[in-house]
Amino acid sequence: QVQLLESGGGLVETGGSLKLSCAVSGSGFRIKSMAWYRQGPGQERELVASISLGGVTTYSDSAKGRFTISIALAKNTVDLQMSSLQPEDTAVYYCALNSHSSDTPSWGRGTQVTVSS
């Protein structure tokens, strides 16, 4: 069973930076890929960035050039470095894990990111 715990959210001014981390724990699974999603007020959850074990990354158009996703297998963490934050980046950010043993991703509980204008 997989447990995901996000951290690093908070309040930041426009143009600022934040680094989110997701700690992975549990057993009985093999990681295929990991991702960060976000859900803003009144919006649907959307993919922000994903990374495979081989290091192949994908980004949403809004994240390209500003956010960087990275995975540290030795520490069982996946990070999202965010810079040039804008008020529209305000959302709850969720960590997701895709494993070889399940068709559905596992989710963390989320961490709030608020960007003040």
Image (spheres, rainbow, N blue to C red):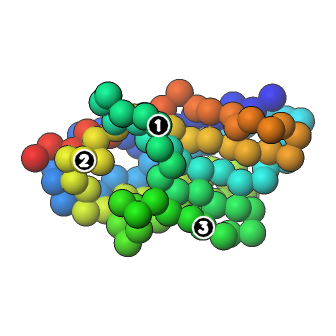
Give the mark nearer the N terminus: 3 vs 1.
1
Q: Position of residue 66 (x, y in %)?
A: 35, 66
Per the image, the residue denoted by label 2 is 88
* Residue type pointed to by label 2: Glu
Residue 77: mark in rendering:
none
Q: Secondary structure at mark 1?
A: loop
Q: Nearer the viewer, residue 34 or 62?
A: 62
Q: Position of residue 111 (x, y in %)?
A: 43, 34
* Residue type pointed to by label 1: Arg
Q: Tell me the residue at 32%/28% (across/down).
A: 42
Q: Secondary structure at mark 3?
A: strand
Per the image, the residue denoted by label 3 is 57
- Real-space CA distance between mark 1 and mark 2, rounded to the nearest whole angstrom: 14 Å
Look at the picture and state if 21 lies above or below 5. below
Q: Residues within 10 Å of mark 3 (few under 14, many from 20)?
A: some
Per the image, the residue denoted by label 1 is 45
Residue 29 sits in quarter: top right
